Image: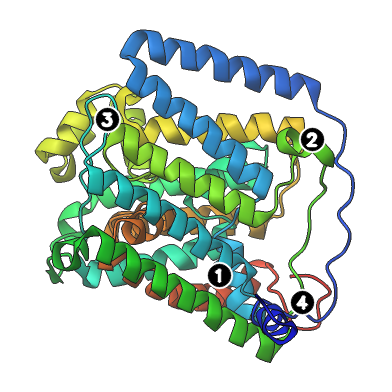
Amino acid sequence: MATTESLAGEKKLLDFPTSCAAPAPRPEDPVKVVPLAVAGALAAGLTSYVWASYGAKFGVLLILGLALGLALFHSRFGFTSAWRQLIAVGNGQGLRAHALLLGTAATLIALIVGTGTGLFGSKPAPTAGALGLSLFVGATIFAIGMQLGGACASGTLFAVGSGQSAIVLTLGGFITGSVLYTWGYPLLSGWPEFKGVLLADHVGWFGSWAITVAVLLGIVLVTRVVQKRRTPPPVDVVPTAHGFARIFRGSWPILVGALVLGALAGAVFLVSGGIWGVTSAFSLWGAKLLQLFGQHPESWEFWRIKANATSLDTTVWKDKNSLTDIGIMIGAAVAAAAAGAWKIHSSIPWRTALAAVVGGILMGVGARMAGGCNIGAYLGGISVGSLHGWLWGVFALGGTWIGLKLRPLFGLANPVPTDSIC
């Protein structure tokens, strides 16, 4: 039976002090009926088309993408802001949410791989990303880009879906950067590297899971120490519904979002046999757009690689990452309209617009160099026990520090200790 002293000790351990209390959330605005109707019809119609034309597996992947978009928006789950808040003022709330997301996904994926379970004929096939200079440089460049562009890979998609005009420029830059990488593939590939390390190959799947969870718990404790020493401002809150309506209108507590997103990442793995990814689709979309305008990216060395050539020759409706990406944008539109938050901003300062495009280009190049983004490399790598996922996170933190130094050049503010919120 717990004593008074032990309960007090537990409370102290879980205490994450801030300089002041977070403001009370405001009520959400009324539902945006027309955007909700349009997004809902698009979600239903596209799902029916993909399911009927290409089969249940691809229909389910699109549905999972829709659910990811709902969860990302309702929880306002961020990677960019989480790293910025940690580096700038020491608030580790976002990184603790990452730990819960990663732990949830790692647990489900370990169960799937350990039992050899798969749906629609898929077989779980975790892989280890290569370790080398390209990973280190790519992760750093990506992190700089997301601090300038205002969003990560998943954040870009759900922000576009919710009507944030500046992030449309980020997405355009992201696709452009991805295309630039495929065009410059001979120069940007073949850098010194070592074969990837998959923990399960050395300690089994249970051992891999145990090590992953232990490290994540350690990260939570480290963020507590950092936050206690720096006493940062609290994280800003967003308008929220109350009671049962909160499920459908938001906003969800960030830890609830982490659990839901972790479960959905596991579901993508179960259905497809591979991790949830985002950015490879941008290269594919860019190449197909070039073909639409009479260009021939298929002649580039990158698209002559057998697997890439097959992807380029196949419809995007059979591409896993394209389906979930499109689903995220539509799902976020549904969620934003239901929350009364869907809107298009007609005025964007020129420096913000420039930062969005430059940041997107850096993320596009960086993601391809590093073999993935905050989802495919960071979440995906860590959740399957690949060492490259952890290293991606370390170098992304370094890139975040550089990105914070560059943000003021574009008129972008960073949190400071004297703020009331961060």
Q: How crowded is mark 4: few (under 14 residues within 10 Å), some or many (20 or more)?
A: many
Residue at the image point whose x is 38% and y is 33% from the top: 322
Q: Where is residue 382 in the image (x, y as percent from the top left)?
A: 35, 61
Q: Is residue 340 visible?
A: no
Q: What element carries label 4?
A: loop
Amino acid residing under circle 3:
Gln
Q: Observer-nearest residue: 115 or 219?
A: 115
Q: Distance between the residues labelled 2 and 1?
A: 32 Å
Check residue 233 in the rendering and tell me which mark sits there, or answer none.
Answer: 4
> Residue 329 appears in which quarter of the rendering?
top right
Q: Marks 2 and 1: which is nearer the front?
A: 2
Q: Marks 4 and 3: which is nearer the front?
A: 4
Q: Where is residue 128 in the image (x, y as percent from the top left)?
A: 21, 58
Residue at the image point whose x is 82% and y is 28% from the top: 31
Q: Can residue 70 be seen in this view?
A: yes
> Residue 281 appears in which quarter of the rendering?
top left
* Residue of label 1: 83
Amino acid residing under circle 1:
Trp
Q: Residues within 10 Å of mark 2 (few under 14, many from 20)?
A: few
Label whose residue precedes the other's in the sequence (2 or 4): 4
Whether residue 129 is situated above or below residue 245 in the rendered picture = below
Label whose residue precedes the other's in the sequence (2 or 3): 2
Q: Is residue 298 left or right of residue 358?
A: left
Which quarter of the rendered picture does the N terminus lie within? bottom right
Residues at discs 1 and 3 in contact (Cβ within 8 Å): no
Q: Observer-nearest residue: 66 or 199?
A: 199
> Residue 344 appears in which quarter of the rendering?
top right
Q: Distance between the residues labelled 2 and 4?
A: 30 Å
Q: Where is residue 228 in the image (x, y as percent from the top left)?
A: 68, 87
